Image: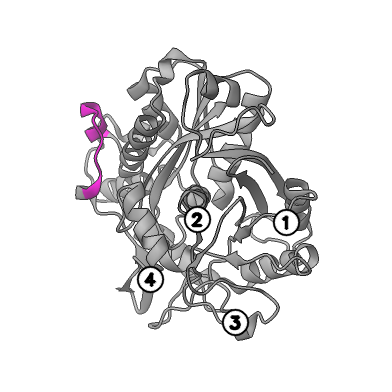
Amino acid sequence: MCTKGLHFMGAVITGMGIIGPGLTSIESYTNILKAGSSVLKKEKFKDKYIHTGRVCSEDIFFPFAKGKKYPKVAQMLLHASEMAVNMAGVSPRDYKTAVIVGSSGGGITEVFKNTKDMEQNNRLGPYAIGNMNANTLSSALNAFYKLDGQSFALSNSCTSSLDALHLAKILIKSKEVDICIVGGADSTVNELVLSGFIPLRVLQTEEAFTGPFSKGTGFAMSEGAGILIVEDEEVALKRNAQILGWVEQTSMSQDARSPYLSDSAGGAMLRAVESCVGQKKPTYINSQALGIKENDDIESVVYERLFAKKGIPITSIKGMVGHAMGASGMFQVISALISMKEQFIPPTLYANRAEYPNLPIVEKTINTPIESVLITSHGYGGNNGCALLSSGGI
């Protein structure tokens, strides 16, 4: 996309890969974002309608024979990582490389499967413990690329993959590593997790879908994996890598209220966004908004406090691809990178402008130059995460 040079010797992105519901490549994801089409499906769950985004097992590809023993969530991660590494044109083993993977659910689907097997008096296999361990996600990448350096598996609810990017920036800035394979993966569309969310009244359970910025009845759960190759800018330039974007800033905060609640006033989220953006003006905001009234209201509060006078467009991709839990931040980051390359702002599907009259919500694809994008995320338990990406320094 851009190789403008040594504008601050920071962290740059040189590769990306993704798999999600109805998408198996950057190209298919680009088509969905540009067209403003939804990959979500309506299904009956118990006595309710829900809207989900499931990844078909036959769509997952990974060139690693041992990966067939891995849980679906790790297989999706391998699918996305090979795409990202190939795009970056790098051999991770030739550099000081760290692996950082964020996941909200980790191996929870495997825990559920094995528990059901035990209830039926079935013997568990030798891979059961490993597949239930969230660390399997990062160790799968280490095994495939034969990396024996720093490795992290983060579980910070829905901000997990943005937090992984935050850690990557810290490691690169400190010169501890040259390259980070940064990812997010979740496969939580299962009976256990869905049943747990329904009493919270945050799942979309109406027959007709209501999406982000609609004061709707909840979100659509999806699944998938996204991977970035994040490098020290000096390393990337020395090997003549194509730079897809710069990680200008990242930030985190915690509401410190409860494991079961977030701060509806949005104070900690506001501080995170202020820390991330400073005096800079992003071209648009890729918002966390996903259809839960409290979350969307927090986004609105932060926007009106910081950006109302600047007229910065705001959008959410959750009406198109759903909310992939801990992987959702990677979905947002990759959509931002695509929009900077292709010069467009993706639309917000199913928004209700009347509910948020003061927000310049993007409802149809806007073709315009994109210099930078602010990504926001917050999750169950009060975690907040932000990232500011640019196409060449701002």
Give coordinates of residue 202: x percent, y percent. 53, 70
Label 1 close to label 4 by CB (< 8 Å)? no
Decide which of tag 2 and tag 1 comes sooner along the chain: 1
Please tell me the numbered disc located at residue 51: 4
Decide which of tag 4 and tag 2 comes sooner along the chain: 4
In the image, residue 66 lies in the stretch drawn in magenta: yes
| Residue 387 seen in the figure | yes
Give coordinates of residue 366: x percent, y percent. 51, 67
Residue ID at (48%, 15%): 95
Left or right of 253 on screen, residue 320? left
Secondary structure under badge 4?
strand
Closer mark to the observer between disc 2 and disc 1: 2
In the image, residue 255 lies in the stretch drawn in magenta: no
Alpha-carbon distance for marks 3 and 4?
Answer: 22 Å
Alpha-carbon distance for marks 4 and 2?
Answer: 30 Å
The magenta segment is 59-69
User: Neighbour class for label 3 at 10 Å: few (<14), some, many (≥20)?
Assistant: some
Left or right of 383 on screen, residue 82? left
Closer mark to the observer between disc 3 and disc 1: 3
Residue type, numbered disc 4: His
| Residue 189 seen in the figure | no
Give the number of marks.
4
Residue type, numbered disc 1: Met
Alpha-carbon distance for marks 3 and 1?
Answer: 23 Å
Mark 3 lies on residue:
353
Residue type, numbered disc 3: Arg
Please tell me the numbered disc located at residue 269: 1
Secondary structure under badge 1?
helix
Residue ID at (75%, 50%): 280
Decide which of tag 3 and tag 2 comes sooner along the chain: 2
Label 3 close to label 4 by CB (< 8 Å)? no
